[in-house]
Every structure is written in structure tokens, then in C-alpha cells.
Amino acid sequence: MTDDFDAPRQRLPRTAYFDAAWYAKELDALFDRAWVWVATEGQLKDPGDFVTCRVLHHPLFVVRDADGELRAFHNVCRHRGCELVEGRGNLGTAVRCPYHRWTYSLQGALRGVPNEKECFGSVPRTAMSLHAAAVGVHQGMVYVNPHPNPPEPFDAWIAGLDEHAWPHRLDDGSMRFAGELRYEMRCNWKVFYENAVDGYHLGYLHDRTLGKLRPHNNVWRRVGRHAMWYSTERDGSPQSSSILTAQLADGAGAQRLPGHETPNYPGVVMLFPLTVFSPNPWGFYISVIEPTGPESTTLRTLSWVPEGFWGRVFAGGGEGEVVRLEELKEHPLESGNFQIEDMWICEKIQRNLRSPRFAVGPMANGPGAESPVMHFQQSVLAYLQGQLGDRVAAA
């Protein structure tokens, strides 16, 4: 169900953005139960195909078993805790630990222990299965959750997303993977997230990169704990990109996907708490927010572009590059990259959070302003306070 946002007010204390104890609580009560994008379904087509990932301190992997079912496990051997698999590929018919060659089935059951009788007598098979995680699939996207039985089941977490479907498929041959870029930011993950869903700043901080997106020219729509962004500058239905973005992209020779002349789908999809989709007529971006500490965050951005397009993919960077503000050769406002502009602002906010004078004043009302910030904070509190039965915690 999609509805409007409530009138905004700050719900979190400023210590939530730098306090180590608060961050530790998020690790246990939020990230240990969070759904996060891990792969496309096309990367896991055949039995034995696997991909690894990390959700904060949880190393995980997803594998397709012999029956065609996707399964997720903690990437931890039950013998001495060794990491079982690396990267991605195909495991064949079993998972084998490289340390002592303990072997598990693709369903996670312990299947073999070298020299078992001589060294152990016997090892209880059922008690030593791999620790399970949870996996979910929606529209060709694969998500993982460190918790084997998440308090917020996948179907409940993803509910309502189809109301905002977009015509992007990463496995139909229309696009190819173009690389990954990493932004290393000196800010708390919530500072970044709140900036991302703040529609009030778009027409001011980003006037040269996104254009005149004043609060009445853009809108965020709530979908459970998630939020979808649209540009409303044009007459007719909302679209995925601003007028200026379209002018800059088309003017630079970016190739539009067939059928995307009028992109009436969201341009930003914020999947609480750590996944960001950015569909547009010129490709598709998936970003994963990786909190690395109370005051540091990495954003991994993976890019897909139309098949046959070989132009520059990342504005202000190259494939595989790591972006840090201190290494830029120009001021962030001269970069021509709205993501770098956001990094600059987020780090400026983070530096001020410890000031005794820091306080959040009145927040701009409306779904195209700062109301989505409160919606996000309510979702954080719902996890930390154990209120996952509610779609969003009460104000």
C-alpha cells in the first residue's frame, strides 16, 4: 500500500549518528535481521552456482542446489570456522572447506569428515550442518538475510513493490554489466540514507547536476519501509529522471533503452535498510550501503548499460575506482557528480554532530521535502525496539 508521509520531526538523538553503543545495537537488532540485495537471479542459474557477500560482520553465500532451489548459508565451516568459499562460481555438487576438507551438501548438511573414525570417533551430522541464512527472490533480484527466520519475512518486507514496477530486466540481453564503483564516506550510514531520501535539498545542492527539483517538482512514495522517488517536473505521470538529467545524458550521447522514451517508473528505489536501485532510460544502478563503523560508510555501486554501449559509465570516475573526497583534484561542487556532492554534504554534517550547538530544526513538510526522513527513522526504531509486527513504527 502506498500512502503519503506524515508531517516530519526528528525521531533519533544526535548520538545515534556517532555513538559506538548505538551502532552496536544496530548490528544486533537491525543488520542481523536485514534483507540486502546480493545478486541477480541470472548469476545463479545452474545447480552449484554460488555468490558470496557480507552483511556487516556476517559472511554469507547463496547457492542453487540440485533441486533448483536457492539456499543461503553463513560462510563459516562448522569445524574450525574457516571461510568456505570465495567470490562466485560453481561448486559442483558439494561445499568443501579448503582447510580440512569437511564437506557439505548444497542443502547445508555435513556429508563428509576426513579420517573421521581415527580422529573423532564420529561427528553428529545433524548438529553440524551449516548455519542457515534466509534468501528471497523478487523480479529477478536475489536478497539475503543473516537471520534464518527473519522477524520480518521476505514477502512482508517486499510487499507493495510491484505497484512501482520498472521495465528493467538484467537477464534479457538488453543490458550488460559495466563495472563497480566504491564511494568511501566519512559519515554514519544514516546520515547518507537521510540525505538520499531528502527531496528538499535536490534543487539547491544539485542545481547544476539534477536541476530545479524544488519540493513541488519531485515526490517520494512510501511502500512499507521503503521509499520510491519520482520527478514531477513534467506534465503527466511522474518520471524516473529530472529534465536536466535527461538533457545532460541525451546531449552526451548516452544510449536509451528501447521503450524508455517516457520512463514512468521511479528513478530511485530505497529498499530499507541497505539497498538502493536507480532505474533510468540509460541503464540500471544497484548500490549497497555498507556501514563500516559508527562514522564511516562505503557505498558499492554496480552499473548496467545498454548492450553495445561503450561510453563512459561513471561520471567523475572509472570502472573499479574508489572515490574519496580527500583525493579529488577539484572541489566536490565542480565534479559534475551529484553523488560526490552528496558525499561532501554528508561529511560536513557528520563533522558537526558532536558540536554542543548541533540540533535539527524544523523539517520541511511534504513527500517532496523532508518527510521521508522521519519515515526512515521510524523504520530504524521499529527494528531497534522490536516492533517488526508493524509495517512502520507509530510516530
Image (spheres, grey):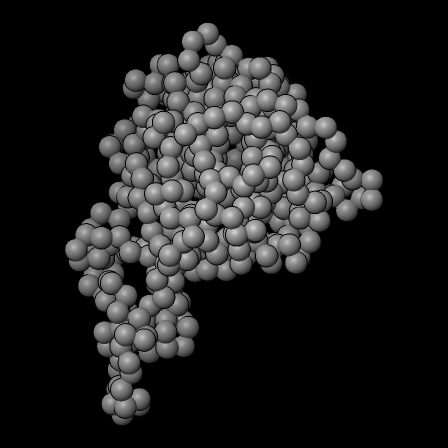
The quarter of the rendered structure image containing the N terminus is top left
Front-most of 387 and 122? 387
Q: Quadrant of the C terminus?
A: top right
Residue 57 placed where, x, y %?
Answer: 50, 60
Q: How many marks?
A: 0
Q: Residue furthest top?
A: 235
Q: Please say whether residue 368 is visible from this viewpoint.
A: yes
Residue 335 visible in this rendered orientation of the protein: no
Q: What residue lies at 22% left-to-right and 53% top-to-bottom?
A: 69
Q: Give the image location of residue 231, x and y in percent.
A: 49, 18
Residue drawn where x is 43% and y is 9% of the image: 236
The vertical placement of 210 against 75, above or below, is: above
| Residue beneath the point at 34% across and 43% down | 155
| x then y, percent, for residue 239 | 43, 18
* Residue 84 located left or right of residue 13: left
Residue, far right:
357
Relative to 249, residue 19 above or below: below
Q: Is residue 215 left or right of residue 172?
A: right
Picture residue at 47% right of the left edge, 26% below the top: 3
**Which of the pair 25/17 is nearer the observer?**
25
On the image, which quarter does residue 379 sit in? top right
Up the image or down, 308 lies above or below 104; here it is above
Residue 206 as seen in the image, left or right of residue 256: right
Residue 62 sits in which quadrant? bottom left
Indicate left or right for 9 with 248 as reference: right
* Residue 280 drawn at (x, y percent): 41, 24
